Image: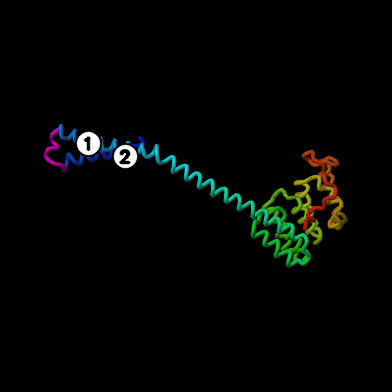
Amino acid sequence: MRYWWTTLVIVLLVVALGLWGPPRLGDAGYLLTVVAAIATLAGLGFAFYGWFASRELPALIDEKVRARVAEAKRELEGLAFRQQEAMQKVIASYAVDDPDRKIALLEQAIATYPDTYNVFVALGYAYLAKGDPGRAQECFREDLRRHPDNYQAASDLAALHAGAGEWLAALDWMREALRLRPAAWRDFEADERFAGLRAARPQGYRALIETARAQAPEGREPDGRPGDSTANPGRRS
């Protein structure tokens, strides 16, 4: 059925010649000769197409494949370069004390590669240092949107709400952080940003800590790797 249209064209030509062609078309022999000629021309066309397909198409396809592979390689190399450049800007921001300069550097990193790990957490801390907790919260939320497994951003949101006396929201984000990394219960216990939460909501706070401790055996991560008891959630800037 691939070349059904060719058969249709031949039939239409034969019908057209029969209706509007020379009077000799009434001669069956002449009509058969015309059909044979048309079929021969069609066969030659197919033969030429087959030769072209066997000689030229593989080269054309191979050329297109090579071009696409080269393009993909360039894209990957460009992506790797942008990732490295953005990460270098994030690392450099840690040595900058001025909040405005730090924000400018981190925004450059985001413009270069917005999915750089922890870049929005670092930007959130820069806004906190500038006295803008609203923008800091936006940054922490954006980091979680891009990296849903980053417990540090959830921890920082918990600390932000705890610092504002918003105890229920603080407990909610603390629950999320401990869900992502149960071993982080040690970090919450050592973090003075949660002193007010511990005093204001001791039962809720303690329940979350004990649940996390049960899920993360002492000294081990949930996957069996050694835990880090010195980490402080979110303090990466």
Q: Position of residue 20 (x, y in %)?
A: 16, 43
Farthest residue, direction right: 199
The amino acid type found where label 1 is placed reads: Ala
Cα–Cα gap, marks 2 and 1:
18 Å
Q: Position of residue 112 (x, y in %)?
A: 64, 58
Q: Which residue is at 17% across, 41% downward? A: 19
Query: Badge 2: how crowded within 10 Å, few (<14), some, or many (20+)?
Result: few
Q: Nearer the viewer, mark 2 or mark 1?
A: 1
Asked whether residue 204 is in view, the answer is no
Residue 205 falls left or right of residue 55: right
Residue 32 falls left or right of residue 184: left
Query: Badge 1: how crowded within 10 Å, few (<14), some, or many (20+)?
Result: few
Label 2 sits on a secondary structure element that is helix
For disc 2, the marked residue is 5
Give the residues drawn in magenta, as a range.
20-27
| Badge number at residue 163 | none
Query: Is 217 drawn above or below residue 136 in the view shown?
Result: above
Lower position in the chain sequence, tag 2 or tag 1: 2
Q: Which residue is at 78% across, 51% downward? A: 174
The amino acid type found where label 2 is placed reads: Trp
Can you say which quadrant of the picture contains the N terminus? Answer: top left
| Badge number at residue 37 | 1
Q: Which residue is at 67% across, 56% downward? A: 85
